[in-house]
Image (cartoon, rainbow, N blue to C red):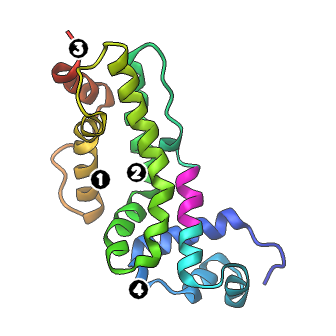
Amino acid sequence: MPRYIDVDGLFDTTVAVFAERGYRATTTQEIASRAGVNEATLFRRYGDKATLISTALTHALANAPFAHPTTTGDVTEDLVALVNAYVETNRMYGGAVETLLVDMQRHPELRTVIAAFMPQLLNAVHVIATHQDRGQLTPGDPVQKLVILLAPLMVFGMLARSGAEMPVAEFDPNALVATFLDGHRAR
C-alpha cells in the first residue's frame, strides 16, 4: 500500500460507496479496498466511519459547482448558470446527497454534513434575493422561489438514479428558466 494517500481520490471513493450503499452498508474495508489504502490508515486519520464519510462529503460539497453561484445584472443568465451548476453538482454527487438526507434521520452522526450543504443553498438563495432586491423577480420568500426553480431537476434526478423510464432525455436549462421567469419575473 502507498505511503502517500490521494485524499481527493479517497474522498471521491468514500462518497461513491456511501451513495451506492447508504451509511449502514458502507464499510471502511470496502472504501480502503477501492481507494487502494490500508483500512488501519483510515482509522488513524479519521477515527471512525462517520467522520470519514462526513469529511468526504463536506469536502465534495464545498468544491462542487453549486457551491459558487455568481450574480451579475442579468437575471436570466444568473438563473441559467445556477441551474447548470445544480445539474452538474447533482450529476457528480446527487446520489450521495439523497442518501445523506435519508440516512441522517437514522444516523445522527451524519447531521453535521448538512452544514456543508447549507452555505450552497444560502448562496443560491442570495442569487434569488439579489434579483428580487433589484426588482427583477417578484417579492416573496427566496427559499421557496429557489425550490420552485430547482424542483423539476430534483425530481428528475431522483427518477434517473432510480432507473425509472424518463419521459424526457434531459432538461433544457434555458427553457426551465424561461418557464420559471414567466411566473416570477417582476412586471
Q: Nearer the viewer, residue 1 or 113?
A: 113
Q: Which mark is residue 90?
A: 2
Q: Check contact, mark 4 vs mark 3: CB within 8 A.
A: no
Q: CA distance from mark 3 to mark 2?
A: 29 Å
Q: Position of residue 29 (x, y in %)?
A: 58, 89
Q: CA distance from mark 3 to mark 1?
A: 29 Å
Q: Which residue is mark 3?
A: 186
Q: Which mark is residue 97?
A: none
User: Callout 2: 10 Å neighbours few (<14), some, many (20+)?
Assistant: many
- Identity of the amino acid at label 2? Asn
Q: CA distance from mark 1 to mark 4?
A: 23 Å
Q: CA distance from mark 4 to mark 3?
A: 47 Å
Q: Report the magenta residues as a range.
A: 56-62
Q: CA distance from mark 2 to mark 4?
A: 22 Å
Q: Position of residue 160 (x, y in %)?
A: 27, 56
Q: Position of residue 65 (x, y in %)?
A: 52, 42
Which element is circle 2 on?
helix
